[in-house]
Amino acid sequence: MMEETGKAGFVYTIETLDAQGTVIDTEVVKNLIPVEGLNYMLGASLTGVTPQTSWYVGLFKGNYTPLNTDTAAGFAAASTEFTDYAGNRPVFSASAPAGGALTNAAAKAEITFNTDTTVYGGFICSAAGKGAASGVLISAVRFASPKAPGAGGLLRITAGLTLFSA
């Protein structure tokens, strides 16, 4: 068995804005890349697994802690995905990789709440439809503290992935 020499993962910056657009909270938190995401990354880069070309950001409102065994097929239901906003899941529009890293800092994902709801975490997957049970779950994160921007408020999500050589 190979020895573990390091970890890779997404780091999220979550900005909570109220309905007037005032930032009321900012948090930085590290994610979990479930086995499904790790296998996808290895397969797409080294064994010919078909690459996913679009990724999407979602939120969950269940008091749920992501697990290493989570998959896209069951994550929306297990975590109680938050879906009370307009349109599909926002696109995770990442920069071109440079220096072993990429980020969506130039095009942050934003989700405007239609209701006064509390969310506990977020995720990145390859399916656009809210509540979809398909695709690949590449990242899941539980926030350090719940977020409740109120109706008309929003979460602005920046996520970046860094890989490094051991």
Image: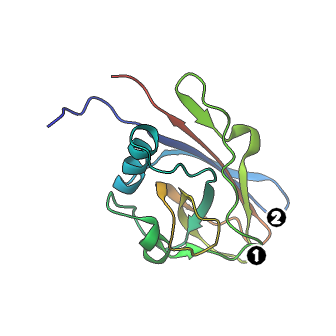
Residue occupying the point 27% across, 29% down = 5
Q: Is 3 positioned to the left or the right of 122 in the image?
A: left
Q: Is residue 24 above or below residue 81?
A: above
The percent coordinates of residue 21 (x first, y second) are: 83, 56
For residue 19, the mark is 2
Whether residue 110 is visible to the viewer of this picture, yes or no, is yes
Q: Which residue is mark 1?
A: 114
| Residue 73: image location, x then y, percent | 44, 71
- Earlier in the chain: of badge 2 and badge 1, it is 2
Can residue 32 be seen here? The reply is: no
Residue 78 location, quadrant: bottom left
Q: Distance of mark 2 from mark 1, alpha carbons?
A: 10 Å
Image coordinates for residue 33, horizontal then vertical, percent:
41, 50
Element type at mark 1: loop
Does 162 sit left or right of 109 as displayed? left
Residue at 70% over, 60% down: 90
41 w.r.t. 162: above or below: below
Q: Measured from the top left, where is residue 127 in percent x and y?
A: 59, 64
From the viewer's side, name the closer residue of 45 and 144: 45
Q: Three-letter amino acid code at disc 1?
A: Asn
Q: Estimate how packed mark 1 is, as few (under 14), some (14 to 19) or many (20 or more) residues with alpha carbons within 10 Å.
A: some
Marks 2 & 1, CB-CB < 8 Å contact: no
Residue at 56% over, 52% down = 52
Residue 154 left/right relative to 39 = right
